[in-house]
Amino acid sequence: VGQLSSTDEQRTEVFVNPYTGKIIGERISDKTLIGMLLELHYSLMAGETGTIIVGIAAFLMCILTITGLVLWPGWRKLIAGFKIKLDAHPQRANFDIHKVAGIITVVFLFFTGFTGFCWNFYDLTEPIIYAVTFTPKPSELVSKPIPGKSTLGLTEQLKIANAALPGAVTKSIYFPDKPEDALQIRMKLPQDSSDYGDSNVYLDQYSGEVLRVDNALKMRLGSRVLNSFTPLHYGTFGGLPTRILYVFVGLAPLILFLTGFLMYLYRHWTKRPIKNNIYTTSN
């Protein structure tokens, strides 16, 4: 089934039979359950303000993962760092759950937070990524309108793209919003691990001239880093096993927040003093 998505605020999606051209369904993406959950996830359904808040929260999560890693008691005694004593005092059991859940998920949580922060502040972080990787930022591509000539047909555009990147399969086509914008065709090579492909062919929408080819297997470091954000954030880099793992990674922040909050309450509101410091490692 072919899928066409608009770029307006409502993101209307139309589903088309690719053989007959018949429209078989349509919907407003942002009104679907997945669409609403996605908007809640990255912007709290609060527009640009929500996007900034979530971006800051993601950055703070990165800091918490680093400080938590430094404070992990397993550095002093490895076995104790992975031990949970559920039959101990509730305060000790709570601390054990916090330290084990944290150390198991720390790397995944850091990269999830880092990629989320970079996405929500993309205009800020993109040039920084290119700078620290010593990668020149790709130049803006433009089409040259030809008086009296319309844009090339889709069949011709795809033919040119296939010739520019042999062996690749077309995954998405991004039609230009403006007369001077380039046409972007996203493609997937057989060796590409991404579900939707990270290769792109950019065409002049009038002449069909190939303006640039981004081969995912030959990209420079900065572009590879940016392309790695999606599999790192969604957990798709290892196939089905890491997708399942990320279900539990997604629950980790809630577990860490609850156990951390209880640790705060125990530390600041417990009236009876505790003789032994349970936050020191023991057998």
Image (cartoon, helix red, strand yellow):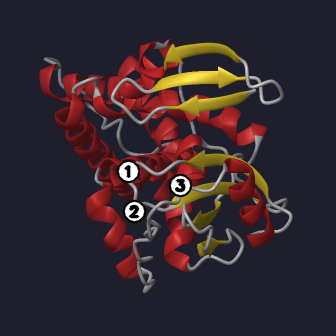
Query: Is residue 65 visible to us here?
Result: no
Looking at the picture, how far across and down is residue 150, in whole percent? 53, 55
Labels 2 and 1: the sequence-earlier one: 1
Alpha-carbon span between mark 3 and mark 2: 12 Å
Mark number displayed over residue 150: 3
Query: What amino acid type should be assigned to the residue bearing mark 1?
Result: Trp
Instruction: Name the mark nearer the viewer: 3 or 1.
Output: 3
Going by the image, does 149 lie left or right of 119?
A: right
Residue for point 78% across, 60% down: 159
Q: Are marks 3 and 2 in contact (CB under 8 Å)?
A: no
Residue for point 37% across, 45% down: 280
Q: Are marks 3 and 1 in contact (CB under 8 Å)?
A: no
Q: Residues within 10 Å of mark 3 (few under 14, many from 20)?
A: few
Mark number displayed over residue 180: 2
Picture quarter with the C terminus: top right
Residue for point 49% across, 13% down: 33
Considering only vertical position in the picture, is 223 above or below 261?
below
Going by the image, does 121 lie left or right of 150?
A: left
| Quadrant of the rendered image containing residue 13 | top right
Looking at the picture, how far across and down is residue 155, in whole percent? 74, 50
Going by the image, does 77 lie left or right of 90?
A: right
